Structures are given as structure tokens and as C-alpha cells.
Image (cartoon, rainbow, N blue to C red):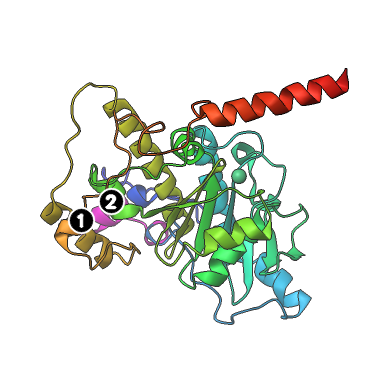
Amino acid sequence: MTRNGQAATIPDDAILTPSARELLQDLEASGAKAIAAAASAPAVKAASETLAPPAKKLNSKSPKSELEAFFNSPYANSLKEQICEMGHRLWKRAYVDGNGGNMAIRVGEDIALCTPTLVSKGSLKPSDMCLVDFEGNQLCGTKKRTSEILMHLQMMKKQPKAFATCHCHPPYATAFAVAGIAPPTCMLPEYEVFCSVGVAPYRTPGSPDMGKLVADLTDEYNTILMANHGVVTWSHNNIEEAYWRMEIIEAYCRTIVVAGQLGKPINTFTGPQMKELLNIKQSLGFVDPRIGMKECELCDSGEWRPGATSPTTESGSPSIGLDPEAEAAVKAITDQILAQMK
Ligand SMILES: [Zn+2]
């Protein structure tokens, strides 16, 4: 209508997508009749768009009424919506199973928004979200907070830059976590720039010990494989970036597993190529223990490579049933026990 010179009337409360708003602004700029109100109508927020946080920083000791007001503020609501959007993406990509997976966002000195327990990430709603203090005590929200919150909070306490954290069980990356292998490096640029991967040993999910082992890795790594469990990531920017790390490590693990089946040697980056990627990484403010290393040190590790067989019976690793002396001793003891039982 505007293009044809008609006075299009767009209701005051109309919600315009960013591209629609841009189109209207372009039409206005090109002299066509546009509606000022429409151009200033609020756009639908992209997940990565965040409202400015409130000027007053709250903490766990703030009055209950202020915490409640904050919890229901437009800022907190925009973060809740972002968490839901990421939850839906995690579920659609089959990175979570049952009620698995959880996320948190730091919103004050020692408080964080987080996902509830026992809710599928596929059906997450903003009204499901919780506010907790850094000890895991729930401050606001009607649903109970996730049982794995301690790990997220310990990460935030240990790594002051961690603004958002995301945990899930993407199958390919989790397979590496089950095998106890850090994915080999120097093969794909996205992975090198966005992820720095450390491996934390297994502990019971939700236990303080688990949280500590993960938190201790956050100085140098933003993506942590949790042995026999899954992956947890953090971002200094927003929850979507923490989520992106999941997509990137999962795609990477899947790609190298397939590459290993092609029957050809795998090509890797040279030291100088790798150095360039790490320079980009550094400029984006991402951590990586390799930043500052010499080029020749970047890609020469003897870790597992796609297509290679893990050396389980070589290099002096113990193998069962090959020591005749021990076998004889075991047999003697077994015979004795059996004789006693008779
Ligand atoms: Zn988990």
C-alpha cells in the first residue's frame, strides 16, 4: 500500500519483524509515504538481542520484593525467553533426552536465572524459570530449579567472565566423553575458533565434586566434556553463544567420526594456519590454553586421530590373563575357596 502511495494504516500495537521495519524505513527514505508510528514500532526480538540490564545490581541479600520485581522485569523476561529458545533448539537437535540438559545466566553479583528440574527442554516456557543464589538456594519461581545447578554456579564463581552456561548430552560429543577422548584438534576452523575443549573426570551429576572439577577447567576452556555424561559450555557474551558451542562441538565430533571411516589419511592445519585461527580466537575474547604458544607446538600432539585404533594392548598397558604366575596364583586361590565351600 505504501509503495502505491496509499496511506497504509498500521495499528499502533503492530509488531514488525526487523526486515519489515527496515523496508518501511527504506520506503520512507525513498520518499514514499510511510507511517512514522510504524517505523518506531517495536521489532520482534532476535534471541541474541538483549535488553539493557537494570542499573541497580541486585544480590542474594537484596529485599525479596526487589528480587521478585527484577525476576518479572522486561530484562529478566527477555533472558527467560532466550533460555527457552535455546532449550527448544537443543531438543530439536536431539542434544537432550528426557528432562536432561540445563542452562543458567548470571544476573547479579551472586544470583542467576536457570532452568527448572524435570521439564523437557522441548517444552520449556518462560514461566518455568527460576532465580537462585550462588549456593543453589531458590529465590524466585514456582518450579524447582535444576538439580545440576551447582555445576553452573561453581563455573560462574570460578570464572568471573562466565555470563551464561549451557549443559546437554549431544550424542557424538558425549561418545568422546564416554571414551575419555578429547576430540583431536587442527582440522576445522569453526571448532578451533569457538571451542576450547577440556575433559573433566566422572562424578555423580549434581554433586559439588562434579562442579568443582568442571569449574577448575574454566580458566582455560569454554567447552568441557564431562566423562561418561555430556558437555557443558560457557560464554562471556550470551546464552546463544554457549549454545553455539554445543552445535559446533557436536558437528565437529560427527564430522571427524565420519572422516575416520573414509580410509584416507586426515589432513590437518599447519602451525602457521593454526596460529592465525588462534589470533582470531583471541580477538573475540575466547580463552584457549594454546594462545601464546609457538607455532610448532600447536598441532603436534600424539592424541587420538580419526581412523586410528586406540593402543589399548600396546605401550605397556596392562592386559588381563597374560601373566602365567598370576594366573596360577588365582587358580590356586579359587580351588581353595571352592574346596572350602564344598
Ligand atoms: Zn546432564
Lateral position of residue 16 relative to residue 139, left or right: left
Q: Nearer the viewer, residue 216 or 60?
A: 216
**260 inside magenta stretch:** no
Question: Does 59 sit above or below residue 13?
Answer: below
Quadrant for the C terminus in the image: top right
Can you say whether 325 is above or below 166 in the image?
above
Please state, as top left, top right, bottom left or bottom right, where the N terminus lies in the image: top left
Which of the 4 quarters of the picture holds residue 107? bottom right
Residue, disc 2: 192
Is the residue under label 2 in contact with that under label 1 (CB below 8 Å)?
A: yes
User: Residue type at mark 1?
Assistant: Leu
Q: Position of residue 237 (x, y in %)?
A: 42, 64
Decide which of 211, 327 is in the foreground and name it: 327
Mark 1 crowdedness (10 Å alpha carbons): few <14, some 14-19, many ≥20:
many
Highlighted magenta segment, given as a residue range = 21-38
Circle number at residue 277: 1
Q: How many marks?
A: 2
Q: Quadrant of residue 28?
A: bottom left
- Residue 96 at x, y percent in the picture: 57, 37
* Quadrant of the image where one finds ligand 1: top right
| Residue 137 visible in the picture | yes
- Answer above or below: position of 105 versus 190: below
Residue for point 23% across, 42% down = 187
Q: Is residue 53 left or right of residue 19?
A: right
Residue sitting at 72 percent across and 55 percent down?
145
User: Between disc 1 and disc 2, whose residue precedes?
Assistant: 2
Residue most extreme to the top: 342
Q: Is residue 57 left or right of residue 52?
A: right
Q: Which residue is at 29% across, 64% downward?
A: 284
Please tell me whether mark 1 sits on a helix, a strand or a loop.
helix
